Image: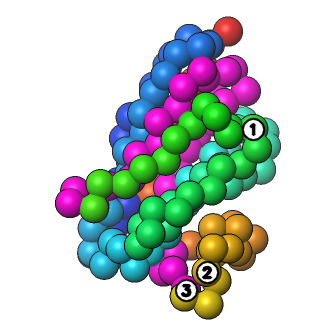
Amino acid sequence: EVQLVESGGGLVQAGGSLRLSCAASGFTFDEYVILWYRQAPGKEREGVSCIKIYDNSTYYEDSIKGRFTVSSDNVKNTVYLQMNSLMPEDTAVYYCAAERARQLYGSNQCLISFMKNLPEVWGQGTLVTVSP
């Protein structure tokens, strides 16, 4: 069964840190990109970070650059999103999603994946709440 299982959300004060995990199963991990999305209350879902497992290339949306770090453990088939210096505006449900990487897309894989917004599999989401 193709599956993504997220964990690590919770309540944290502004300035604090959390690490989200996205455990993958049922597909060949290093053939995929893992995308992180978030959806804040009353807002549309937005893509925030991405990692291409094959070469560990990464992408960060401007609002999280320098604060969030995405990484992968290819032994555990797990992607992590380390979130530091959290702000109340980071409050959202965070989702990981997976899409098969395309050689044609090269270094633009993450941007193209977010533009297409058609991942093949989604995690269940995990709530991150940042208090002032």
Q: Residue under circle 3?
A: 102
Q: Is residue 115 above or below residue 36?
A: below
Q: Amino acid at mark 1?
A: Ser
Disc with the residue nearer the chain's start (2 vs 1): 1
Which dot, 2 or 3, sits closer to the camera?
2
Residue 87 lies within the magenta run: yes
Mark 2 to mark 3 CA distance (whole Å): 7 Å
Image coordinates of residue 17 in percent, x first then y, are: 49, 22
The crowding category of the residue bearing disc 2, from other C-alpha atoms within 10 Å (few below 14, some 14 to 19, many at least 20), is few
Residue 99 lies within the magenta run: yes
Q: Is residue 110 above or below residue 126?
A: below
Mark 2 to mark 1 CA distance (whole Å): 24 Å
Q: Residue under circle 1?
A: 63
Q: Is residue 101 above or below residue 52?
A: below
Q: Residue at point 52% right, 41% down?
A: 69
Q: Are marks 2 and 3 in contact (CB under 8 Å)?
A: no
Q: Residue under circle 2?
A: 106
For this view, does 80 lie left or right of residue 127?
left
- Mark 2 lies on a secondary structure that is helix
Q: Residue at point 67% right, 9% down?
A: 132
Image coordinates of residue 41 in percent, x first then y, are: 72, 36
Q: Is residue 105 above or below residue 77?
A: below
Which dot, 2 or 1, sits closer to the camera?
2
Image coordinates of residue 118 in percent, x first then y, are: 63, 75
Image coordinates of residue 130 in percent, x first then y, are: 60, 20
Segment colored magenta: 75-102
Mark 3 to mark 1 CA distance (whole Å): 27 Å
